[in-house]
Image (cartoon, grey):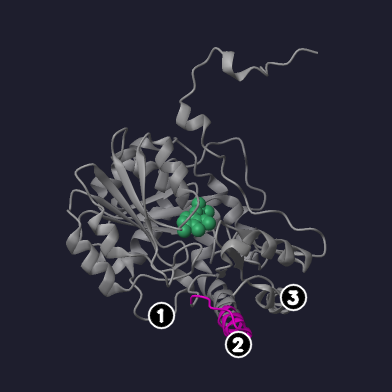
């Protein structure tokens, strides 16, 4: 049988962009074996609420969705007291990040973000043809915002600030963020990635929506994937100045936000109280888990998302194997392991393994 594949990639006729060939494909969180918990993708562990299931049941598939997601954007605009043009929806907030980066950055341009942060950022910048400037987090795992502001050059087109930061769980305070905005030129787009905003309980944390009227270069990104439990449907949104969001709309793949996603998002907003009860449960579980881990001897940043960060350093691979053997599928990311807050039953399992791992950490 002949196949279209060519084993000899060096002599392949089509010239691919070398930086794309060299880029590692996005790695999804590992699936869990039958007796383990999949805590590798920061998903909402609760099953969908009835209102969401009802909203998408029996939907027709032969018609295209509303390309502008008008009803959902109107709903979000009302909620945030913004004009509808200042709301943009995408197939997950990650696709809006991609659109915004492409709208501002091209080859020769730089995009700054903290590292370690969301593992999708490097690929999105590379695909745009731009260059990543990664600014190391502080020893306490928080963004080093003064260093990020100092890294801005004439080539900087955008900065991504992630709060709570995936994977370290730390927040940026309102004060820190305002100082940062004062130091960054208004010609640089600032994307405030608030994918986990609903889980934040620290009252000092920045709230992007409160600052939109103050900064003409600020866009806030939110998602229905986490607190609202719609990860499978792919829907997120951005809030910000219409001149920036219009540019994002111009780079978007048309019709990529599906009708079930739009309907489910509206149903989720209509039944938000029910979903926020789930969020409250996850927050309680997160705080209880963090306290128990500290009591076990872990030095772990206080989590403000729906996950905890184990800074396991050089011991990360071994620690991830131990977690896996103990029925916890976390996400090993270089110098640490991120574990999502999952089903209540997963917490006991997690704490049993973490007690064992902490004892084995090299001191
Ligand atoms: C910080 C951060 N931003 C954005 C996203 C993307 O979310 P989605 O594309 O599902 O809306 C994630 C998902 O894990 C994330 O952790």
Against 1, is 276 above or below?
Answer: below
Q: Where does label 3 land, which residue? A: 349
Is label 1 or label 2 in front?
Answer: 2
Q: Residue at x 33, y 73 (%)?
A: 173
Against 24, is 336 above or below?
Answer: below
Residue 172 is left or right of residue 313, and the answer is left
Q: Position of residue 21 (x, y in %)?
A: 52, 30
- Alpha carbon separation for disc pair 3 and 2: 16 Å
Q: Secondary structure at mark 2?
A: helix
Of residues 89 and 60, the one nearer the viewer is: 89
Query: Disc 1, disc 3: CB below 8 Å?
Result: no
Q: Residue at x 40, y 63 (%)?
A: 137
Of residues 362 and 256, the one nearer the viewer is: 362
Q: Where does label 1 land, which residue? A: 202
Of residues 79 and 342, the one nearer the viewer is: 342
The image quarter containing residue 3 is top right
Q: Secondary structure at mark 1?
A: loop
- Alpha carbon separation for disc pair 1 and 2: 21 Å
Q: Position of residue 342 (x, y in %)?
A: 65, 70
């Amino acid at each position: 049988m002949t196949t279209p594949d060519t084993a000899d990639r060096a002599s392949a006729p089509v010239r691919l962009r070398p930086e794309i060939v060299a880029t590692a494909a996005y790695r999804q969180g590992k699936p869990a074996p039958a007796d383990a918990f999949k805590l590798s993708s920061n998903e909402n562990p609760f099953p969908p609420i009835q209102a969401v299931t009802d909203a998408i049941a029996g939907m027709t598939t032969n018609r295209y969705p509303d390309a502008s997601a008008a009803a959902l954007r109107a709903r979000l605009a009302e909620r945030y007291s913004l004009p509808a043009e200042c709301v943009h929806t995408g197939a997950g907030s990650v696709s809006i990040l991609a659109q915004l980066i492409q709208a501002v950055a091209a080859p020769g341009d730089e995009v700054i973000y903290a590292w370690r942060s969301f593992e999708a950022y490097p690929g999105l910048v590379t695909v745009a043809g731009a260059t990543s400037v990664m600014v190391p987090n502080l020893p306490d795992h928080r963004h080093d915002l003064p260093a990020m502001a100092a890294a801005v050059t004439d080539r900087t087109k955008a900065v991504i600030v992630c709060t709570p930061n995936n994977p370290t769980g730390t927040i940026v305070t309102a004060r820190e963020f305002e100082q940062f905005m004062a130091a960054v030129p208004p010609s640089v787009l600032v994307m405030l990635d608030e994918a986990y905003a609903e889980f934040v309980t620290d009252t000092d944390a920045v709230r992007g929506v409160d600052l939109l009227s103050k900064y003409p270069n600020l866009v806030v990104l939110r998602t229905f994937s986490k607190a609202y439990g719609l990860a499978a449907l792919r829907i997120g949104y951005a809030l910000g100045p219409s001149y920036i969001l219009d540019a994002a709309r111009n780079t978007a793949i048309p019709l990529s936000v599906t009708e079930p996603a739009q309907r489910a998002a509206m149903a989720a907003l209509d039944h938000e109280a029910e979903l926020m009860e789930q969020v409250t449960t996850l927050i309680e579980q997160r705080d209880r888990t963090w306290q128990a881990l500290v009591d076990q001897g872990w030095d772990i940043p206080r989590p403000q998302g729906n996950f905890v960060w184990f800074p396991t350093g050089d011991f990360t691979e071994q620690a991830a194997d131990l977690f896996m053997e103990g029925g916890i599928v976390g996400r090993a990311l270089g110098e640490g392991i991120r574990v999502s807050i999952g089903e209540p039953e997963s917490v006991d399992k997690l704490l049993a393994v973490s007690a064992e791992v902490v004892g084995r950490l090299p001191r």
